[in-house]
Amino acid sequence: MKILMLNYEFPPIGGGAAKAHLCLLRQYTKRNDLQVDVLTSAPKPGAVTEKFSENITIHKVGIHKKQLHYWRRIEVVEWLIRARFHYRRLLRQNKYDLVHAFFGFPTGWLCYRTAGRLPYVISLRGSDVPGQHARFQLEYKILGPVFRAIWKKAASIVACSEGLKARALRFLPSVSIEVIPNGVELDRFSPAEDDEKPQVFRLLTVGRLSVTKRVELLIDAVEILHKQGYDLRFTVVGGGSQEPQLRAAVLERNLEGVIEITGRMDSDDMPQLYRRNDIFVSASIQEGMSNAMLEAMASGLPIVTTRCEGLDELIADNGLIVEQANAGAIAKAIQKLADDRSLCRQMSLAARKQAERFGWSHSAEQYLTLYDRLR
């Protein structure tokens, strides 16, 4: 079987979808009955071809990228224009069984244009599905008809969570959508021994610092607990448009000794970072399925999160879901775990057990079964 995969972001460019694609490819390297070409981006102009493994080749289309983890509209358009030439070249040179596009747009647009020649699968990731994402409201209004056209011609549409599927069906109820969840690298992310952690109660959040993540609510909640006398530390990992404002807020409230904003961290440092913390906190408005939350769970961290999509599969007896997205409610949920270390320990064990349901090997097998059905 020969597959062409499209993704306009791939490490070091991008966020969760880029990482998910990378992890999926690592599983595909184990298959000698599968050949994969990947068409993606590079941060500088030019075309680069890299051998990922014996059966996987990555074709990178370079653009004028200003920031690795933030896409400007002009960059998306530039990639789409440049990638179109390379996409058609690959189709001429190879006989593929199907195309697998990460994101319905912009990548889905390329395979939509050749739907008569080759079936395509769309993996919906979150931002490509109209919803509450603050930054993309204009795009959703303008490109809504394009999204619908791309989805309708797809041979299959896959969402990474039940919550994302529900959002997608609200946008276009007439299509059929199946769910293949994200996975987690269970061998990389594992719980710490109790004696590895300090006595200070440590909170962690990981992700792009965007309006959608509502990290300011988490800072408010930590300030409440700090004023109540709790000895805690809060680490914010990630970069993004909100980073300057969040750093300013920490300084204004004299919380430098309590809250640390690290910026982005190298992926090699993340397993140990998770193990140094006690709970993972999130106030995101919407998610497809959070890779960071899965990594935290695999590392044995209980979850405190506001209600959003992508939680139904992840949170059972391993965390607390805050129904009212306000700082006081978040602070009370954190306080519950800080005051009851036995409960925190129980949720830690449950978190790892829950994460073990989401190995990347299982996700890869589901995709391969889908490919085989469609070709």
Image (cartoon, grey):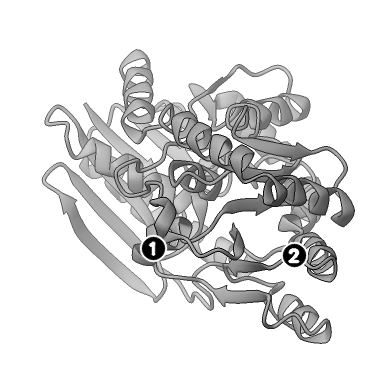
Of 243 and 97, nearer the camera is: 243
Q: Secondary structure at mark 1?
A: helix
Q: Is residue 103 left or right of residue 225?
A: left
Q: Residue at x 29, y 26 (%)?
A: 97
Task: Determine the secondary structure under disc 2.
Answer: loop
Position of 255 relative to 123 (above/below): below
Label at residue 267: 1
Instruction: Please indicate, yes or no, whether residue 308 appears anywhere in the rendered image.
Output: no
Percent across and percent down for residue 26 are: 26, 43
For image coordinates 39% across by 55% down, the residue present is: 40
Residue 248 place in picture, x, y as percent: 77, 84
Please state which of residues 145 and 13 is positioned toward the viewer in this rendering. 13
Decide which of 182, 91 is in the foreground and name it: 182
> Which amino acid is tagged 1?
Ser
Q: Which mark is residue 230?
A: 2
Extreme residue in the top direction: 373
Badge 2: few (under 14), some or many (20 or more) residues near its Cα, within 10 Å? some
Count the marks: how many?
2
Residue 124 disc label: none
Q: Is residue 101 left or right of residue 48?
A: right
Residue 259 is situated, as x and y percent measured from the top left of the image, at 67, 74
The disc, 2 or 1, on the residue closer to the chain's N-terminal end is 2
Instruction: Give the position of the N terminus as an image quadrant.
Output: top left
Label 2 and label 1: CA atoms lie apart by: 30 Å
Q: Quadrant of residue 49?
A: bottom left
Quarter of image, res 361? top left
Q: Residue at x 51, y 57 (%)?
A: 15
Query: Of discs 2 and 1, which sits in the foreground?
Result: 2
Type of residue at label 2?
A: Tyr
Query: Left or right of 238: which side holds 194?
Result: left
